[in-house]
Amino acid sequence: MLKCVPCTYKKEPVRISNGNRIWTLKFSHSISNKTPLVLLHGFGGGLGLWALNFGDLCTDRPVYAFDLLGFGRSSRPRFDSDAEEVENQFVDSIEEWRCALGLDKMILLGHNLGGFLAAAYSLKYPSRVSHLILVEPWGFPERPDLADQDRPIPVWIRALGAALTPFNPLAGLRIAGPFGECSYSRKRKYTSVCIVARENRGGETAFKNMTIPYGWAKRPMLQRIGKMHPDIPVSVIFGARSCIDGNSGTSIQSLRPHSYVKTIAILGAGHYVYADQPEEFNQKVKEICSLVD
C-alpha cells in the first residue's frame, strides 16, 4: 500500500518497554518549527491505511504514523483481560513511543479504535496534546437500553451475537482462509485487513476484552471525556454517509461547554473517511493543524 505514497519517509521499529517494538513511519521529521501530527489507525488496520493522506499532510509539518501495539508489524504482547488495564497498556505504549522519539507535544489524530485511544491518552497525558482530532471514533456512547430502542434487535442477530461472543472479532476472516482474503481484496483500499487478520491475535484479543456484545465499549468514553483538560481543543470528523452514529461531536460539546469542540462532516464519505474522500479529508485536517501553528 505504501508504494503509492508520493513522498520520502523513514521507517523504523521504535523500542519501548518489555522488549516491545512499535513499527513507525516518519515524514518530514526534519521540520522542527511545527507541531508533529501523529496518526492512530483503527481496529483491524495498520499504518498503511493512511497511504492516501501522507503526501498532503506532511507538506509543512512532521507526520508520524505507527502500528498500534498488537497490530500490524508492531509487537503482539499478552494483553490483560481487564478492559481498564488493556486501555492502560495501549495508552502507556503510546507515551513510551513519544518519549523514545523525543516529541514534546503532538496533534493527535485517531480513527475508530485509534480515536478512542487518542482520547484516553489525552485524558492521561494532557500536557502532550496540542489538539485532539477524532475521526469516526469508536467506543464513545454507552450501549443503549434495548427496551428504549424504537426497533429492537432481531432475535437472530441476538443469537448470532451470543454465539460469536467467545471468539475474536476477525475469527471469521481466518476461518474463511483464502476465500476471506479474496472477498476483502475486492476493495483494495482495505486489503491490509487481510494481512493483519492472519497474524498473531494480540490486538484483536485486546479489543475483544474492551467490548461487550454488539461492539459497544465496556468503558464508554463519553462517561469520561468531560474530565479532559479544558484547554485541549477537540475536532470530530465523520463521514456523512457513515453507518456509525455521528452524534459524538454534539455529545462532546455538551460535556465540554467551555472548551473548543468542532464537528466536521465530509460529504460522500463513509466510515473510512480518509480513504473515501482523501482530498477533502486532508484539507480539513490541515486546516485544523493550522490552528495550532
Image: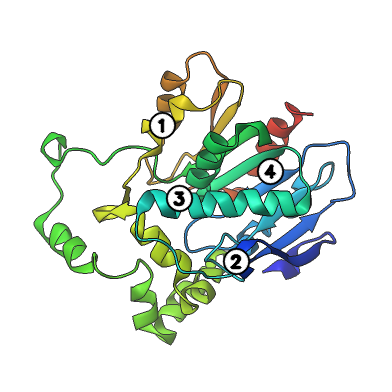
| Distance Cα–Cα, label 3 vs label 2 | 17 Å
Work out whether 142 lies above or below 216. above
Tell me the mark number nearer the camera, choosing from 4 and 2: 2
Tell me the mark number nearer the camera, choosing from 3 and 2: 2
How would you rate the neighbour count of disc 1 (Cα within 10 Å): few for under 14, some for 14-19, many for 20 or more?
Answer: some
| Lower position in the chain sequence, tag 3 or tag 1 | 3
Element at badge 2? Answer: helix
| Lower position in the chain sequence, tag 3 or tag 2 | 2
Tell me the amino acid under the disc marked 3: Glu
Residue 41 occupies quadrant: bottom right
Tell me the amino acid under the disc marked 4: Asn
| Lower position in the chain sequence, tag 2 or tag 1 | 2
Element at badge 1? Answer: loop
Q: Residue at x 57, y 59 (%)?
A: 68
Q: Position of residue 185 (x, y in %)?
A: 51, 75
Residue that mark 3 sits on: 87
Tell me the amino acid under the disc marked 2: Asn
Comparing 14 with 293, the one in front is 14
Element at badge 3? Answer: helix
Comparing 154 with 168, the one in front is 168
Question: For the N terminus, which image quadrant?
Answer: bottom right
Q: Position of residue 155 (x, y in %)?
A: 9, 57
Tell me the mark number nearer the camera, choosing from 1 and 4: 1
Tell me the amino acid under the disc marked 1: Arg
Contact flag, marks 4 and 3 (Cβ < 8 Å): no
With 251 as the anchor, is 14 left or right in this view?
Answer: right
Question: For the C terminus, which image quadrant?
Answer: top right
Residue that mark 4 sits on: 282
Residue 152 occupies quadrant: top left
- Image disc number at residue 18: 2
With 249 as the anchor, is 10 left or right in this view?
Answer: right
Residue that mark 1 sits on: 224
